[in-house]
Amino acid sequence: EVEVILGETRRLMSDGRLGREAHDETSNLSLQNSREAEAPWNARNKRSELDRALEIANGSSNGTAPPLQGSPTIPTKSEASAGTRSEVTYPEGGLQAWLVVLGSFSGMMASFGLMNTIGTFQAYLTTHQLANTSPSTVGWIFSIYVFLAFGCGLQIGPIFDRKGPRWLVFAGSVCVVVGMIGLSESTRFWHFILTFSILGGIGTSLIFTPAVGAIAHFFAHRRGGATGLAATGGSFGGIVFPLALQALFPRIGFAWSVRLLALIFLVLLGIANLLIRTRLPPKAGGNVWPDFRIFRDVTFALTTAGIFFIEWGLFVPISYISSYALANGVSPAFSYQLLAVLNAGSVFGRGIPGYVADRLGRFNTMIVTVALCLVSVLGIWLNIGGSIAGLCVFGVLFGFASGSNISLTPVCVGQLCEPEVFGRWYGTCYTVVSIGYVVRIIIGIYWGYDS
């Protein structure tokens, strides 16, 4: 019926007659349809369509030509300034987009690879340089590191949104490489706090926040898979670096082993500096300062609370699986290798769930992987003691389930905001989460050792 009306309106215009006849015909047809409507919803839809035709007819009577079917329409000033998320287009692939993913992969291999190696450093330091220091005190080195690695996103995220990733990634690269060189010379407790905790933690945050945020500028529908692919870099680093350190410590010593690790980081971060970039302009009216008003969004606030409790428990096995094995009579060589086993599982846990999440839902997939973490801890880890086979099964299963927290969390947060402000939302979320890191590592330290 609407098509008939539109056709008649165009015919009247072409004949040079004004739209009064079309107005009368439209009014009569609107009255007839309103009487014949069987449901309020259908009547409302028909009236809205007829009103639209009426506007076209009135426009013709006023001398305003209606737009032809299929022709582009020019948005009003208010519509253009609104800038809804649906107007943003994404490449969803292409050379530049995948080069950004490669750069993020390299950056995460260095930053998250270092984070996934803290279990090896924890086990080594408690038996060598800091053997006379209580394990609970040594644990503060890694608690502060993780807190800064995630907590600094509160400020880094808004800067990324406004200024882009270039200088952030460069500054983070300097911090990580200089921190590793300083770590190789460290002998006292405060040395490790300065080099590993502070320089390493801030450097990690400066690298991984832009590495995750840049992907959101190039992918929407395939964001889960792209982020998961980049996040596997941290898992590969978690496999290679612990095994390399285990082999190098007895051969060339702690100092040269860490210097070699710093050289590897230099190469990886050089690639990250060259390839990580953004494409969307900053959002108008933004600034570089934190803004906790975003928690007025109830969905975001609840999502942050959920991530807080997820991360509360995930890093305890990652941080202490090597020390746990040593305490249960497992050989030092295999205890160090357990961290590589866990990270081998997380390679698939970061890539596969991200791919699945793009099809079944990001939050749905996160729920399944978190449930699998719970099963692996309560069903396997609490019952294996010093069993090597049990530790291997737990490492692979927990690594797979926990790997999704890095790949799925960014895309879950990204569903709630525009890509131009993703850095602010993601960084603020993990600043809250970082408080949980410190608390639960302290609980693990004092409950697992002192008690």
Image (cartoon, rainbow, N blue to C red):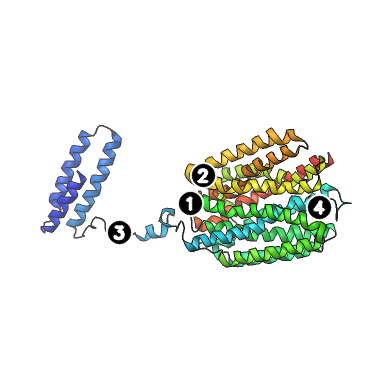
Mark 3 near mark 2, Cβ–Cβ under 8 Å? no
Q: In this rendering, would 237 be left or right of 59?
A: right
Q: Position of residue 179 (x, y in %)?
A: 74, 63
Q: Earlier in the sequence, mark 2 or mark 4?
A: 4
Residue named by callout 4: 124
Label 2: few (<14), some (14–19) or many (≥20) C-alpha neighbours in 10 Å: some
Q: Earlier in the sequence, mark 1 or mark 2?
A: 1
**Residue 376 drawn above or below residue 8:** above
The alpha-carbon separation of the residues under discs 3 and 1 comes to 29 Å
Toward the viewer: 150 or 102?
102
The tag on residue 356 is: 2
Residue named by callout 3: 73
Q: Look at label 4 and name its amino acid.
A: Tyr
Mark 3 near mark 4, Cβ–Cβ under 8 Å? no
User: Which image quarter: residue 18?
Assistant: bottom left
Query: In which quadrant of the rendered image does the C terminus lie?
Result: top right
Q: Earlier in the sequence, mark 3 or mark 4?
A: 3
Q: Position of residue 58 (x, y in %)?
A: 20, 53
Nearest-to-viewer mark from 3 and 4: 4
Task: Report whether residue 13 is seen.
Answer: yes
Q: Residue at image x 41%, y 60%?
A: 81
- Identify the element where label 4 is drawn: helix
Nearest-to-viewer mark from 3 and 1: 1
The alpha-carbon separation of the residues under discs 2 and 4 comes to 38 Å
